[in-house]
């Protein structure tokens, strides 16, 4: 008799659980803001009674901390203080954020054989794309050769107890091609800590998704058309993602023209010159936005052949590289599994 009295209660509890977690009874919360010289947009899906109160303040505080660590445009930021540090061989203590990013940077440097390099900052500044601002003169070959002496992870040392050591006083870092990806990962971690499992985080075009959309389907993320004259919201390809990150790097918006030649802000750290291989964008899908962000930049440098070969060797990583032909048409190069993520418009 006791079992019979309890059974309906169990059924009621189960019914209420499924009703409260059904997709038809969910809510989507949207927040946005500004950070790192760009904007961010976040969508979070919760149950009807779910709350996101206070989460925007937590996100803004976290983004401020990351920017204060890694922005070369802030004079007293952690990275600016390291760049100004001239004591060769002496340890420079760094934060956990900086440590995590520089460790991924070292991995990317080794993986891409120098196509991604955090020590590229002197070149970025000389070409007029960095915090130092635009330069009025074109760099000479001799200048580039001299600056290349300061480029390379060989010039810095990472110690296990969270210290950086310079082997040359003039070495300086630029984490602009990986910091936004790290910020995306950290915001995602913060959202999960608030017991939200279904969300999309986007900062300056870099994206991480978790779970599903409000209708129960994977998140759909657009890749911009990589043309100079294309509207900012024009979509070139759509990918469907769940529990994955997407980062895109392109050289078709930030550039200058001299004597009819377009010079991109993406530099090849090995040659010291802007990339000129026809690649206009590279998109990477991975489980970490930090890694995807940096690798996307490296793929622009490596080009389709070496870039696709590299990605096809990596587990749980896919990519699409777009090259502009001489006639102005675009050609896509995809890793073996990229098609699995593509979606119809």
Image: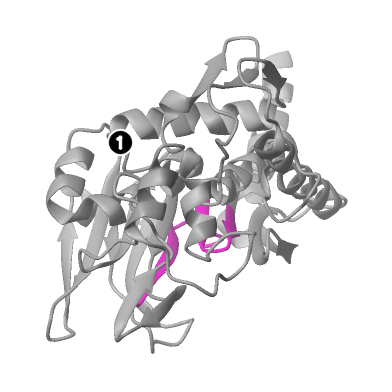
Query: Relative to 182, does residue 251 appear above or below in the rendering?
Result: below
Picture quadrant where residue 37 is located: bottom right
Residue 224 lies in the magenta-colored region:
yes
The residue range painted magenta reads 200-226
Residue 46 location (% of width, % of height): 68, 52
**On-image quarter of the N terminus:** top right
Viewer-proximal residue among 268 and 198: 268
Left or right of residue 53: residue 72: left
Q: Quadrant of the C terminus?
A: bottom left
222 or 277: which is nearer to us? 277
The residue at the point 58 percent across, 28 percent down is 100
**Around disc 1, counting alpha carbons within 10 Å, would you say few (fewer than 14), some (14 to 19), or many (20 or more)?**
few
| Residue 8: percent from left, percent from top | 69, 32
Q: How many marks?
A: 1
Task: Report whether residue 199 is seen.
Answer: yes
**Residue 31 visible from this viewpoint:** no
Residue at left 29%, top 86%?
260
Please name the residue shown 45% across and 87% down the image.
231
Residue behind mark 1:
316
Q: Nearer the viewer, residue 242 or 35?
A: 35
Residue depicted at x 35% and y 47%:
145
Q: Position of residue 191 (x, y in %)?
A: 69, 43
SS state under label 1: loop
- Residue 285 lies in the magenta-colored region: no
Q: How is the image coloured?
A: one colour
Relative height, residue 40 to residue 149 (above, below)? below
């Amino acid at each position: 008799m006791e079992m019979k009295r309890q059974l309906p209660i169990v059924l009621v509890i189960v019914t209420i659980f499924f009703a409260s977690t059904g997709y038809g009874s969910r809510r989507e919360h949207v927040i946005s803001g500004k950070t790192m010289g760009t904007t961010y947009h976040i969508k979070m899906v919760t149950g009807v009674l779910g709350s996101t109160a206070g989460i925007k303040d937590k996100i803004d505080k976290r983004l401020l901390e990351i920017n204060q660590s890694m922005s070369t445009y802030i004079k007293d930021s952690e990275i600016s203080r390291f760049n100004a540090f001239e004591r060769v061989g002496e340890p420079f203590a760094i934060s956990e954020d900086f440590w995590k990013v520089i460790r991924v940077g070292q991995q990317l440097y080794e993986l891409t054989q120098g196509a991604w390099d955090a020590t590229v900052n002197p070149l970025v500044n000389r070409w007029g794309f960095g915090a130092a601002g635009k330069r009025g003169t074109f760099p000479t070959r001799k200048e580039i050769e001299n600056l290349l002496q300061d480029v390379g992870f060989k010039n810095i040392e990472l110690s296990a107890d969270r210290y950086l050591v310079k082997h040359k006083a003039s070495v300086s870092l630029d984490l602009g091609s990986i910091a936004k990806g790290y910020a995306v990962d950290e915001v995602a971690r913060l959202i999960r800590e608030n017991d939200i499992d279904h969300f999309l985080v986007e900062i300056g075009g870099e994206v991480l998704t978790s779970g599903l959309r409000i209708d129960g389907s994977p998140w759909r993320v657009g890749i911009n058309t990589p043309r100079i004259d294309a509207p900012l919201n024009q979509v070139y390809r759509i990918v469907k993602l769940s529990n994955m990150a997407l980062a895109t790097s392109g050289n078709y918006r930030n550039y200058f023209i001299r004597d009819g030649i377009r010079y991109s802000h993406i530099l090849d750290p090995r040659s010291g010159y802007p990339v000129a291989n026809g690649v206009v964008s590279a998109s990477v899908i991975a489980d970490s936005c930090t890694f995807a962000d940096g690798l996307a930049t490296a793929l622009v440098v490596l080009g389709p052949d070496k870039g696709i070969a590299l990605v096809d060797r990596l587990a749980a990583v896919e990519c699409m590289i777009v090259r502009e032909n001489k006639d102005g048409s675009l050609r896509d190069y995809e890793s073996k599994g990229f098609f699995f993520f593509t979606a119809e418009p």
